Image (tube, rainbow, N blue to C red):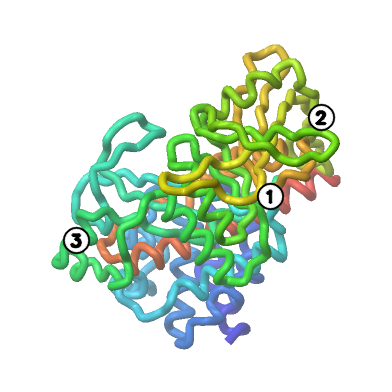
Amino acid sequence: MAVEAQSTILSIDFQRRWPDGFDGYDTVLAELGPLLFASLSRSDQRRTGATYLRGLLAAEGRKSIRNLAGLLGPQTNEQSLHHFINSSTWEWMPVRRALGRYLVRVAPPQAWVVRPMAILKTGRHSVGVDRRFVPARGQVLNVQQAVGVWAAAPRLSAPIGWRLHLSRAWLDDDARRTKALIPDDAEPETLGDCGVEAVLESVRAAGLPTRPVLQDLRTADAARVVRRLRAAGQPFLVRIGGMLPLVPAAVSAPSRSAVRANPVSARLVLAPLRDLRRPVVWTDGIPSVGGTVRTTLVGASRVALPPMPGESTGPEGELLLLGVGDPGRQWPTELWLTDLVDAQHGALVRLGRLLERVERDFAGVGARVGLQDFGGRSFGGWHRHMTLASAAHAVVAIARADAAHLLGAA
């Protein structure tokens, strides 16, 4: 099976140049392909999967099934590609797990980054599409709302799992559910809960190594997400808004017993620390290929979550609140909350920069391989397309990172 999959990956349109003129993708395809499609039991499915993946990499413009079939030539049947994505029987989770294990091996992640993605749509029939407020745009738009889980390291990042956020308008409409083939166990959830579930099914259920979950929660219910991550035993570093209520933990010497105060906003917790800030020197990027040394002012305080209504006390265990800002500018410009209370502040600052790594890769690679281009209407079709688009993203990211490393070492 592995030999056949590798042969298929390399034989399809082997002579065609890639759109950007870069020829490093074939090496990654030859290694990843056999692993990616090993769970597909039928040879025709493995061949079609390889065809679709290569089409995502080679096609320019929108990655519709029609465009992929047109690019790959008369030997590729558009109907077979459509069936393979929208109504075939192959399971996408084993393919995603194979992709995750491969990334852990070749580009070990330092964090699992949870990133929401709003996909603009013009109609109302694509699965999950609804009118929603999109914080990044500051508008109510017609979108599909999804959450991706990314394996992130300084040299590259790539998505390994996706969860489609479905509104009640879809889940309470039996006719729409049936037509889109939405599973019976899909239930209403907040966008924050959607992100937590995405981590649990993409990382924990797949047996991937424990790494901190990194997420921007400034526009989400940060306290709820933090509580759920702590309950799951999942370490985290999350960016928060300044108004999040927290309980300062005043430590009295010499006993160092924590004395809980009343909840105040995160920004007010940090206000007394302005004169206690300390410079932290850290490397932005990859030190081995010329990362940039930066200095950041950091102030930190031990805190806890306040109790929920009806609770007498909040969750056990202290958290660390970090205020981060550059010298000469208003401080803090960023607020972070983590359960990694004993970690070095410089390491936490550098870890937080992986959010930017994911944003760069999403903009520079994700759009190129079709992460926002699925035009079908079925729940399974969306997940199968996203799985193969994630694999295409990994191929591009790894090949480019390898090339940059060789260039830096030369």
Residue at the (49%, 56%) spot, across then down: 196
Q: Looking at the image, is 183 positioned above or below residue 131?
A: below
Q: Residue furthest left?
A: 175
Q: Position of residue 173 (x, y in %)?
A: 16, 62
Residue 27 appears in view: no
Mark 1 residue crowding within 10 angstroms, few (<14) / some (14–19) / many (20+) = many
Closer-to-camera residue (360/334): 334
- Residue indicated by mark 3: 172
Left or right of 402, for residue 192: left
Mark 2 residue crowding within 10 angstroms, few (<14) / some (14–19) / many (20+) = some
Q: Say what secondary structure mark 3 lies in.
A: loop
Closer-to-camera residue (294/400): 294
Q: Position of residue 245 (x, y in %)?
A: 51, 33
Q: Looking at the image, is 118 positioned above or below residue 47?
A: above
Quick one: label 2 or label 3, which is nearer the N terminus? 3
Quick one: label 1 or label 2, which is nearer the N terminus? 1
What amino acid type should be assigned to the residue bearing mark 2? Val
Instruction: Estimate the spatial distance between the alpha carbons at disc 2 and disc 3, rounded to whole Å.
Output: 52 Å
- Residue indicated by mark 2: 281
Q: Position of residue 396 (x, y in %)?
A: 59, 54
Q: Is label 3 or label 1 in front?
A: 3
Closer-to-camera residue (347/193): 193
Q: Quadrant of the C terminus?
A: top right
What amino acid type should be assigned to the residue bearing mark 1? Ala
Mark 3 residue crowding within 10 angstroms, few (<14) / some (14–19) / many (20+) = few
Residue at the (55%, 59%) spot, across then down: 231
Q: Which mark is residue 243?
A: none
Q: Position of residue 321 (x, y in %)?
A: 65, 35
- Residue indicated by mark 1: 153
